[in-house]
Image: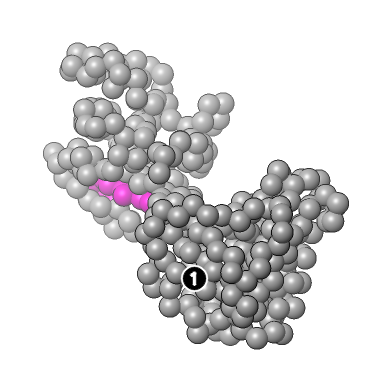
Amino acid sequence: MSDWLSDLAGRARRGPLAMVSVLATEGSAPRGAGTRMLVTADAAHGTIGGGRLEYQAIEQARAILSHPAGTWRVQDYPLGPLLGQCCGGRVRLLVEHVDREALGWIAGAAAGLRLMTTLTATRVERQVTEEAVTVAPSARGDTLRPGARWSETIAEQARALYLFGAGHVGQAIARHLPGLPLRLAWFDTRPLFATIDGVTSVPEDTVAACIADAPGDAAIVILTHDHALDYALVLAALRRDPVAFVGVIGSATKRARFLARLERDGVDADARARLTCPIGVEGVTGKEPEVIAIATLAQLLRLERAPC
């Protein structure tokens, strides 16, 4: 996700700032390539995984703040031998004193684009590009020197979550969304819920049409106040081009009744097989709204991403 971009832009306006970037990992490591942490003289924002690795990285970041803006270092950490962390992997970090006058590239950054990074003797140069360049650093081998160049995807596009129903479970799902790679489109037919932040109020006779707008990798989660409305939404979701997930809150009995009715309404077996009911990761049996919400979000996080 691209939260680090807005964080970088905001904190750079306030004073000297260092950034720690995970360039590459090998074996077990706390976080993956592309993870960032911002460090000032008295605070750290974000995490590269905690433990001794992060402690050392923060020390390095604060040390580099005493050097001119643009100064950078590449640090290699074999986690077991050097830091005593039981992960046992290797991590390569870029530690830099952020040049606050050279952040114009952030304005053009967006999910799905690529960020090209080039190391020079005195600074880190970055450029946003649409090119499908796949150069990436390795966790092993010679340390990176001036002239090294690599690219990364700025952020994976968050999956669209089309959520129908703003009752207790819908509100719990929305509460737990911040920080997850999901972007919410939230609908309810009851005027009572129109005042909830983020909810789009849609008449009951047209709400099913909203499903046609969902992108192909969307997750559609249906948990309205009415079984008939649930069914109308399920029918619309299964009759359109396949999406990544179609789920409806309910029991095994509700699933059986819906499947029988879908068959009578001419929905083919392949489409019927795409229906998930009950929703939520298997083995979580609590019926409290927060439990259902977390189990459902965990299920959505397990969905495979379409290949780029």
- Left or right: 296, with 211 as reference point: right
Q: Residue at x 61, y 83 (%)?
A: 69
Q: Nearer the viewer, residue 215 or 91?
A: 91
Badge 1, how many Cα within 10 Å: few under 14, some, many 20+?
Answer: some
Q: Residue at x 39, y 63 (%)?
A: 129
Query: Mark 1: which amino acid?
Result: Arg
Instruction: Name the secondary structure under disc 1.
Output: strand
Q: Residue 211 location, x and y as percent?
A: 23, 39
Q: Residue at x 30, y 39 (%)?
A: 216
Q: Does residue 29 lie above or below 122 as drawn? A: above
Q: Is residue 159 visible?
A: yes
Q: Is residue 287 visible?
A: no
Q: Quadrant of residue 54?
A: bottom right
Q: Residue at x 34, y 15 (%)?
A: 256
Q: Nearer the viewer, residue 138 or 8?
A: 138
Q: Quadrant of residue 208?
A: top left
- Left or right: 166, with 211 as reference point: right
Q: Residue 136 location, x and y as percent?
A: 56, 54
Q: Residue 11 location, x and y as percent?
A: 54, 77
**Span highlighted in magenta in the image:** 183-193
Q: Residue 254 location, x and y as percent?
A: 35, 20
- Residue 185 counted in the magenta span: yes
Q: Does residue 77 lie above or below 212 as drawn? A: below
Type of colouring: one colour
- Left or right: 210, with 73 as reference point: left
Q: Which residue is mark 1?
A: 126
Q: Does residue 11 lie above or below 195 as drawn? A: below
